[in-house]
């Protein structure tokens, strides 16, 4: 999956700076495996270093805190998974969340890491995660609200529904169902999100 | 709020056993305040003991682990809040979740504690929280599914919807919206849950 090194003659990615980026990336790739195996909550920065063969000092060089490493691992794993499995074009607002949820479930440990980071963000003294999730939810609600508006123009979504509230509802349903599924794999996330999609569809068609 | 001691002549609650129950209850009442102030994630059993003036050994006498104490605090705070503010009869499936969510938001720290415990339950080695939440969600889905069925019989909920899926959706929406609200108090949980209720209502009425 990792791309082979390419010639970067004259590019700013060459030299010690490029090596640093590469090393940081390696750490992130290996750390997601450690979280998947042990769970994030009780995995200290030192334990991660031991597991991936990086000294605690070196780890601290790349990541100021355990919280920063966790957030970066999450961002990295999610982005990589999105690159490998981009959303098909033309999907509905629910398709978008269904696709992202299915994709994230394919990366061991990623959904758990999301829950751990989110729970941490809700507590005091976790400014970085709090800012990350507050911004993430805000952007996601905006993106989804615009998609609801397009759906309403196309006649796929009931025109009388407030787009922002629908966006918040779809995101909440997807997040909440992921938790229920982690506790009980019988929970069929896609079926329940499909039900929500049906509820949003105008009745005229039926 | 605490009831005065009542005569328990001849009852099994008298004597050292009753004192133990009383002491345990006191610890739970005070611990919720500590979590509200400091957040649960980084509050060790020892720190809770220090804050409420109970030795670590005494705390260990009542609670086998920090996880057990956290779960007990959550159960206790939720039950007490339900006793003080019972659900009005005749509510819909969404009313039930809206009422519980509003009630829990009134207890400082309770919603955060829920998220922390739930995130912990999704990781390995947290058998007790995992069992607690798996059972909790299962019961909640059953209770709500029965309420959906009653709503369908009364004509308040679309008859074509599968009750279990609606139940899972309503719980998920409520949980997910609580997280969004914790990060952004502008999020109007009741408005969005009200939207979900409208979506579940048969169109005939309109």
Image (cartoon, coloured by chain):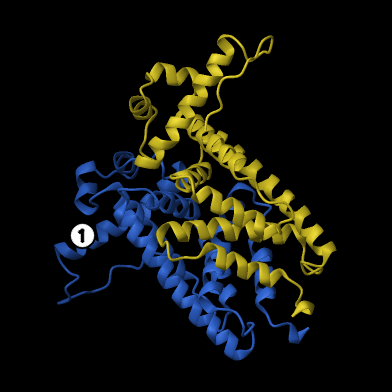
Chain colours: A blue, B yellow
Picture coordinates of residue A89, whole percent (x, y)? 53, 82
Classify residue A160 by image quadrant: bottom right
In the image, what residue occupies the spot 46% across and 77% down?
A143
In the image, what residue occupies the spot 69% across and 9% down?
B10
- Residue A194 in view in this figure: no
Picture coordinates of residue A61, whole percent (x, y)? 19, 51
Q: Which residue is mark 1?
A: A20
In the rendered structure, the answer to whether residue A144 lies left or right of residue A7 reads right
In the image, what residue occupies the spot 41% across and 36% down?
B33
- Of A95 and A156, the residue lying toward us: A156
Which quarter of the rendered picture does the C terminus of chain A lie within?
A: bottom right
In the rendered structure, the answer to whether residue A24 lies left or right of residue B143 reads left
Task: Decide: is B51 above or below B19.
Answer: below
Picture coordinates of residue A149, whole percent (x, y)? 53, 84
Task: Decide: is A50 above or below B173.
Answer: above
Query: Dot 1 falls on which chain?
Result: A
Label 1 Cα neighbours within 10 Å, binned few <14 / some 14-19 / many ≥20:
some
Classify residue A53 by image quadrant: top left
In the rendered structure, the answer to whether residue A124 lies left or right of residue A101 reads left
- Of A9 and B130, the residue lying toward us: B130
In the rendered structure, the answer to whether residue B52 lies left or right of residue B129 reads left
């Amino acid at each position: 999956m990792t791309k082979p090194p390419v010639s970067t003659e004259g590019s700013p990615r060459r030299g010690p700076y490029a090596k640093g980026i590469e090393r940081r990336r390696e750490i992130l790739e290996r750390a997601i495996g450690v979280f998947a195996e042990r769970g994030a909550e009780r995995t200290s920065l030192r334990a991660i270093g031991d597991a991936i063969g990086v000294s605690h000092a070196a780890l601290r060089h790349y990541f100021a805190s355990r919280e920063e490493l966790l957030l970066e691992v999450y961002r990295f794993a999610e982005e990589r998974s999105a690159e490998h499995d981009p959303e098909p074009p033309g999907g509905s607002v629910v398709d978008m969340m269904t696709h992202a949820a299915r994709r994230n479930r394919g990366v061991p440990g990623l959904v758990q890491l999301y829950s751990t980071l989110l729970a941490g963000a809700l507590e005091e003294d976790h400014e970085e995660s709090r800012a990350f999730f507050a911004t993430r939810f805000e952007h996601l609600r905006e993106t989804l609200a615009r998609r609801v508006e397009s759906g309403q123009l196309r006649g796929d979504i009931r025109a009388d529904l407030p787009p922002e509230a629908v966006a918040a509802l779809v995101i909440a349903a997807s997040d909440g169902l992921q938790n229920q599924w982690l506790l009980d794999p019988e929970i069929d996330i896609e079926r329940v999100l499909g039900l929500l999609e049906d509820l949003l569809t105008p009745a005229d068609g039926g």
